[in-house]
Amino acid sequence: MSYLHLGAEEREEIRCGLARGWSERAIARSLHRSPSTISRELRRLGAGADYCAVRAHDQAQDLKRKPRRARKLAERPYNRLRQDVLRKLRQKYAPQQIASWLRRHYPNEPERWVSHQTIYTFIEILPKGEFKREVLHCLRHEGKAGGGPAGAHRPWVDQLIHDRPAEAEARRLPGHWEGDLLLGKAAGGAAVGVLLERVSRHIHLVKLERHDAYSTYQGFKRKLATVPLHYRQTLTYDQGSEMAEHARLTQHLGIQVYFCDPHSPWQRAGCENINGLLRQYLPKGMDMREVTQTELEWIARQLNDRPRKTLNWATPNEVWRAMLNGKSFEQAVALGT
């Protein structure tokens, strides 16, 4: 029997289980996984309060795609190469400068060489904290060639997912959202704005006449304004230019916007999952100009009334309403029992 790797949503459920104080065996039972799978995951990628679902999935994906490059720096914490790279990052060297420096200083030791792409990979899996924020800040202002993390040539990208409050990661308190656009066949034409509340999995849909920055701002503002102030804390989005007006969302609604790393859809795993469900109603190639807001409200009700395994078989509507009425997450999902 082939082994299925843990997915992004399963890692989020591990994080939630740890936050609730569940044992490894209890988490394994809830996911229908072997306890050894959960034990191995926590041993490799952090246990208890140190376990971060986004970072764990980033590391797992990186090791799967680029095993040799990731492991050269990440698997042996105290090797000399890692220390050289960390020291140069603290001196604000760019990854390409570090790669060049290593070759010049160790011309006869290729085992101490590393490419700038490997260094970008290493930066992405650094633990969340002040040092990582400082490195990413420098990279955004230095620019980069040949690819790498966050923000180059995207001046609207000013806060990364790594800066997001821990409570958003934990999925314990409501008010933290993921956003996306569902596009139709017409380039630059109508689209559907998708907003997913991370704790309850409750979705809101809004029709956009165009998928440009101003239309996205207006549509999301209109939808989020119907949500109580306390329940619009953060919004996580990819680095698409349609979010270039996000500062106006913050100004008018108080919601803070955080951006995912490039090409990292698992950092908005909830939205990615919902988009797949939405395609049952809004198939690819459909002209979104034909969809009305009334129809979108009906689709949202259909999905919000579906029981979800991640909510103990309660529906997003039940959990959302219970939490709006002051219930805790545990009390809200008890509705599914």
Image: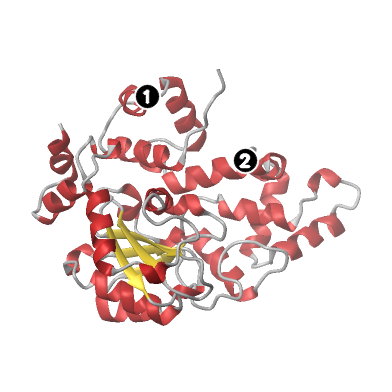
Q: Is residue 59 above or below residue 146?
A: above
Question: Which image quadrant for residue 174?
Answer: bottom left
**Residue closer to the observer: 80 or 75:** 75
Label 1's element?
A: loop
What residue do we see at 73% from left, 58% from top?
A: 116
Q: Amino acid at mark 1?
A: His
The image position of residue 250, as x and y in percent, is 32, 76
The residue sitting at the right extreme is 108
Question: Which image quadrant for residue 206?
Answer: bottom left
The image position of residue 249, as x and y in percent, is 32, 77
Name the residue beneath numbered marker 2: 63
Q: Amino acid at mark 2?
A: Leu
The image position of residue 65, as x and y in percent, is 65, 43
- Report if residue 77 is visible in the image: no
Q: Residues within 10 Å of mark 1 (few under 14, many from 20)?
A: few
Label placed on residue 32:
1
The image position of residue 324, as x and y in percent, is 13, 56
**Residue closer to the observer: 170 or 337:** 337
The residue sitting at the left extreme is 325
- Report if residue 171 is visible in the image: yes
* Mark in the foreground, 1 or 2: 1
What residue do we see at 74% from left, 61% from top?
A: 98
Q: CA distance from mark 1 to mark 2?
A: 24 Å
What residue do we see at 53% from left, 78% from top?
A: 155
Do residues under tags 1 and 2 come within 8 Å of each other at their CB atoms? no
- The quadrant the C terminus occupies is top left
The residue sitting at the top extreme is 1
**Residue closer to the observer: 210 or 33:** 210
Which comes sooner in the sequence, label 1 or label 2? 1
What residue do we see at 29% from left, 59% from top?
A: 176
